[in-house]
Image (cartoon, helix red, strand yellow):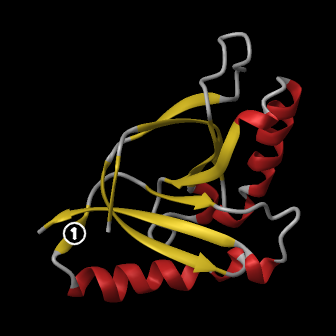
Amino acid sequence: MKTRDTTTVYGIRHNGPYMEIDKAFNALWDWVVAVDLPTQVTCGMAIFHDDPTKTAPQSCRSDACVQLKQPPSELQLSEIVKPIEIAGGCFALYRHIGPYSALEPVYHQFYHQWLPASDYQKTAQPSFEIYINNPLDTPPDELITDIYFPVMAK
């Protein structure tokens, strides 16, 4: 369990299957480089707004994001990169080590095993992932992903 403060990140909306969010991350990194912010990036994040078991993959909404040490200037923002506020609160935190393609069972375990057996319920806030290391220079089996599930006491 972890309590987090409200955080502002900067991201690009992706509409479509969650496993295709890399396209939005590529566009986001192009922006980061174009406005000279690589040294300001503290981590990459993805926010998932829909339940893919209830929403058609082509209709799923997610945000590819970066957290920055300092907010970008108005001149650095673009029409596609927007500030996104992640509300603070109580979160169930799970650390996954391994490829991103193996994350789905973690979500299944959370929703179908941990959550029903816990003293918590999911809030309406979306879940999000924080990518601790870089997939461009880290073997898939060594990727570290922290998944934050927003919860509140029952």
Residue at far left of view: 154
Residue 2 as seen in the image, left or right of residue 63 = left
Query: Which quadrant of the structure image shows residue 114?
Result: bottom left
Q: Residues within 10 Å of mark 1 (few under 14, many from 20)?
A: some
Query: Which residue is the site of mark 1?
Result: 121
- Residue 7 is left or right of residue 104, and the answer is left
| Residue 10 vertical position relative to residue 3 in the rendered view, above or below | above
Farthest residue in the top direction?
75
Q: Residue 24, how many percent across, how many down? A: 75, 46
Q: Amino acid at mark 1?
A: Gln
| Picture quarter with the N terminus | bottom left
Q: Foreground residue, 121 or 51?
A: 121
Q: Residue at x 81, y 31 (%)?
A: 31
Instruction: Say which quadrant the C terminus sits in.
Output: bottom left
Q: Quadrant of residue 80?
A: top right
Residue 127 position in % (x across, y down) = 44, 59
- Expressed as whole percent of the image width and height from the top left, the position of residue 54 reads 44, 69
Does residue 73 lie above or below 101 as drawn? above
In the drawing, does residue 19 fall left or right of residue 45?
right
Does 50 sit left or right of 78 as displayed? left
The number of numbered discs placed on residues in the rendered structure image is 1
Picture coordinates of residue 112, whole percent (x, y): 35, 86
Residue at 55%, 64% (x, y): give it: 56
Q: Secondary structure at mark 1?
A: strand
Residue drawn at point x = 68 percent, y = 29 percent: 81
Which residue lies at the image location 80% right of the left edge and 78% below the top edge? 140
Res. 121 image quadrant:
bottom left
